Image (cartoon, helix red, strand yellow):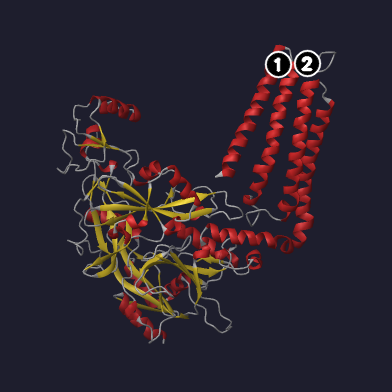
């Protein structure tokens, strides 16, 4: 907190002094007190003294800034490859800043003395020396040292400072808490592979279900704009479930007008649930399979996604569209004329003040969008890009990960925020990110709770804000058990950590500096026949034993290739590691290195792109795809799921047939399993794996 605060204060005061100097100079010039010293004209001594005093204050501030702002800021200075002070900063720029500070103090004293005595030769000489010193040390000497001293022996010069960067980065992103292990994998399945441990593999991607669920299960004035994947216990068995919330949707209202928008169509209508690992007999998503399951007592969604800037007033004379009414006291009472007038002014609408539909019992539901609500309550936190719903007996609760961030962590590398999904609250280029908070918002009454995670217990930033707002953040022990069983590893944090681990999984500065052991997140396989994969492969969610992860844990898996992602030619299509974020233990991230072997004959393990190439090259499948792509249909693929069973790795991917319209419900044609380069097609995941095992032996 201190350095950013001092930087802001210093910049503001220096700007203020510059403006004051310019304004004073113009004022004295217009009054005739300040003249150009020619033709015998002289400036008034008082005017010069005034300007000299302002100049002295400015240089005194420059001295303080050099010591207390500029010099500490070297530790967060971004170089070409590493953040932090390097050889040139430590040995040239830092000492130069002390000299600049000392000479700035001298300039300030000479200006004060000039204002007192009226003699200006000494201040002019001091000011000239200050300019020369600044130019020589910071503008000329520093680049020359960098080019002729550092670059020829960069490794020897920079390694000690790269070590600082390695230590700081692993701490700033909690990479030192990652459970790292090595495991030599077999590329494919064998007769000894325990296929019975493979269960609950999702068959559809989230995006494939958004539009179809809206068509199949949409209701008046609502829209399913996102589908989330979570695990639920159904009949005593944990299963993956797709959930789509029917949020209120302004563009989908059958009637428009102030009364309809704010008094009648006030809420959404429950949640659509679909098993992620099975389908209906016709292969389509089984929207009826969980009928009677996951039914909340209160299904109205007054607070949700896509509601930014849309307020509702409940308990009015006008009944809500479905005949229900708001049964909570968490809104803002609108019984007084002053409050109605305040709302009218805030929204630019006269109806809140003039409408006869409001009563003394009416309540205003304001900031109904989940992220908007959280940002208003806790602006010191950055919230995740993906709020997700949890269905309990009582109702629907939104869960959102909250992060503490900073851009001033000494020596820590900047976060690759460009890879985050749209809507992420982690903006700019922070170099410290911590999943310190789990936030919940009740979809019915809007009540908000912030819970401190294990990672937040020792978080200094969160601790300061807790001192400012005591009682705002609760202990994780206070979270209801039916919510705790649905927590997950923070999505945006895992995206950042998996990107950083590609470079910062090493344990010594020389390897980090050379880049000889860099990884990159594997490229995404194509989403359909004839399509090209683009971007990075997203984490795949499934129940899967991986390394030391307990069997049946709900995890997210990210795959790595060897090579530097910034140099595509260096990336090789072979598996180097797996990152496993454990949702059942939301503070655990595991990194399983798969290329740590001294055996030159060890087989290369396939990546998603290699497995997709095997699918694309299969002649039998090519004929199947040609037939399926005819008559207005098109073939898409489900998630490319890596299945790590013991030491055996295979990939599973479903074949999904859709129409050309986005609203067409997808139909499962079959499931592909790729094992040791062999591709097998089955009606189910189990059948495909059995066939692949037989083919690859």
Mark 2 Cα within 10 Å, few/some/many (few <14, many 20+)?
some
User: How many marks can you see?
Assistant: 2
Residue 579 visible within the image = yes
Residue 661 visible within the image = no
Q: In 3D space, how far apart are the residues under numbered discs 1 and 2 (Cα atoms)? A: 9 Å
Locate the N terminus by quadrant.
top right
* For marks 1 and 2 on the same chain, the one whose residue lies earlier in the sequence: 1
Q: Which mark is residue 584?
A: none
Residue 464: x and y, percent? 48, 46
Q: Is residue 174 left or right of residue 375?
A: right
Residue 271: quarter of image? bottom left
Residue 622: x and y, percent? 39, 73
Q: Secondary structure at mark 2?
A: loop
Q: Is residue 216 left or right of residue 161?
A: left
Name which residue lies at 49% across and 55% down. 419
Name which residue lies at 65% across and 53% down. 79
Residue 129: quarter of image? top right
From the viewer's side, name the closer residue of 662 and 13.
Answer: 13
Residue 179: x and y, percent? 48, 69
Locate the C terminus by quadrant.
bottom left
Q: Is residue 188 left or right of residue 517?
A: left
Against 680, residue 95 (above or below) is: above
Evaluate if marks 1 and 2 touch, with contact meaning CB atoms under 8 Å apart: yes
From the viewer's side, name the closer residue of 687 and 70.
Answer: 70
Q: Secondary structure at mark 1?
A: helix
Residue 497: x and y, percent? 50, 60
From the viewer's side, name the closer residue of 569 and 365.
Answer: 365
Name which residue lies at 20% across and 50% down. 298
Q: Which residue is mark 1?
A: 28
Q: Which residue is mark 2?
A: 43
Mark 1 Cα within 10 Å, few/some/many (few <14, many 20+)?
many
């Amino acid at each position: 907190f201190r350095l950013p605060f001092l930087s802001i204060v210093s910049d503001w005061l220096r700007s203020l002094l510059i403006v004051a100097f310019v304004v004073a100079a113009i004022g004295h010039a217009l009054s005739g007190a300040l003249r150009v010293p020619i033709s015998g004209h002289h400036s008034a001594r008082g005017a010069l003294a005034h300007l000299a005093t302002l100049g002295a204050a400015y240089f005194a501030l420059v001295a303080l800034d050099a010591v207390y702002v500029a010099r500490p800021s070297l530790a967060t200075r971004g170089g070409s490859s590493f953040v932090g002070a390097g050889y040139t900063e430590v040995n040239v720029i830092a000492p130069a800043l002390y000299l600049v500070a000392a000479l700035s103090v001298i300039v300030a004293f000479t200006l004060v003395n000039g204002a007192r005595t009226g003699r200006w030769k000494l201040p002019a000489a001091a000011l000239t020396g200050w300019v020369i010193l600044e130019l020589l040390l910071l503008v000329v000497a520093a680049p020359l040292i960098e080019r002729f001293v550092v670059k020829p022996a960069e490794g020897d010069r920079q390694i000690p400072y790269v070590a600082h960067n390695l230590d700081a980065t692993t701490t700033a992103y909690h990479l030192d808490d990652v459970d790292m292990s090595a495991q030599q994998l077999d590329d494919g399945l064998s007769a000894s592979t325990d296929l019975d441990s493979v269960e609950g593999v999702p068959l559809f991607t989230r995006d494939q279900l958004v539009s179809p669920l809206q068509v199949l299960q949409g209701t008046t004035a609502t829209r399913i704009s996102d589908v989330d994947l979570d695990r639920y216990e159904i009949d005593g068995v944990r299963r993956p479930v797709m959930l789509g919330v029917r949020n209120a949707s302004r563009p989908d209202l059958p009637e428009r007008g102030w009364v309809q928008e704010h008094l009648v169509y006030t809420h959404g209508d429950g949640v659509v649930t679909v098993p992620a690992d099975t389908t209906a007999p016709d292969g389509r998503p089984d929207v009826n399979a969980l009928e009677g399951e996951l039914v909340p007592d209160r299904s109205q969604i007054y607070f949700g996604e896509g509601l930014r800037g849309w307020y509702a007033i409940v308990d009015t004379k006008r009944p809500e569209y479905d005949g229900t009414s708001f049964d909570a006291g968490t809104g803002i009472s609108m019984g007084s004329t002053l409050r109605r007038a305040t709302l009218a002014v805030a929204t630019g609408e006269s109806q809140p003040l003039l409408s006869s539909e409001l009563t003394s019992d009416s309540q205003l539901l304001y900031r109904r969008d989940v992220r908007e609500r959280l940002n208003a309550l806790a602006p010191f936190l950055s919230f995740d890009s993906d709020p997700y719903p949890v269905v309990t007996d009582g109702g629907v609760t939104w869960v959102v990960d909250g992060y503490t961030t900073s851009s001033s962590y000494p020596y820590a590398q900047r976060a690759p925020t460009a890879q985050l999904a749209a809507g992420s609250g982690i903006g700019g280029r922070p170099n410290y990110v911590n999943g310190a908070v789990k936030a919940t918002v009740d979809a019915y009454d809007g009540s908000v709770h912030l819970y401190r995670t294990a990672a937040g217990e020792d978080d200094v930033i969160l601790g300061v804000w807790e001192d400012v707002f005591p009682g705002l953040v609760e202990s994780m022990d206070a979270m209801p058990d039916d919510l705790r069983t649905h927590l997950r590893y923070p999505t945006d944090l895992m995206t950042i950590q998996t990107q950083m681990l590609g470079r910062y999984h090493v344990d010594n500065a020389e390897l980090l500096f050379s880049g000889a052991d860099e990884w990159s997140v594997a490229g995404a396989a194509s989403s359909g026949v004839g399509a090209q994969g683009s971007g990075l492969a997203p984490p795949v969610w499934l129940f899967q034993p991986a390394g030391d992860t307990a069997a049946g844990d709900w995890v997210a898996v990210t795959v790595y290739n060897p090579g530097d992602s910034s140099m595509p030619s260096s990336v090789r299509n072979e598996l180097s590691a797996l990152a496993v974020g454990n949702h059942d233990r939301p503070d655990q991230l595991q990194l399983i290195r798969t290329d740590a072997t001294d055996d030159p004959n060890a087989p290369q393990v396939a990546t998603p792109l290699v497995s997709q190439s095997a699918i694309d090259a299969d002649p039998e499948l090519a004929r199947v795809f040609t037939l399926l792509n005819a008559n207005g249909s098109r073939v898409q693929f489900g998630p490319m799921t890596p299945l790590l069973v013991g030491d055996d790795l295979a990939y599973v991917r479903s074949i999904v047939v859709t129409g050309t319209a986005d609203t067409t419900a997808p139909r499962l044609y079959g499931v592909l399993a790729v094992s040791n380069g062999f591709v097998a097609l089955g009606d189910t995941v189990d059948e495909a794996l059995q066939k692949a095992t037989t083919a690859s032996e």
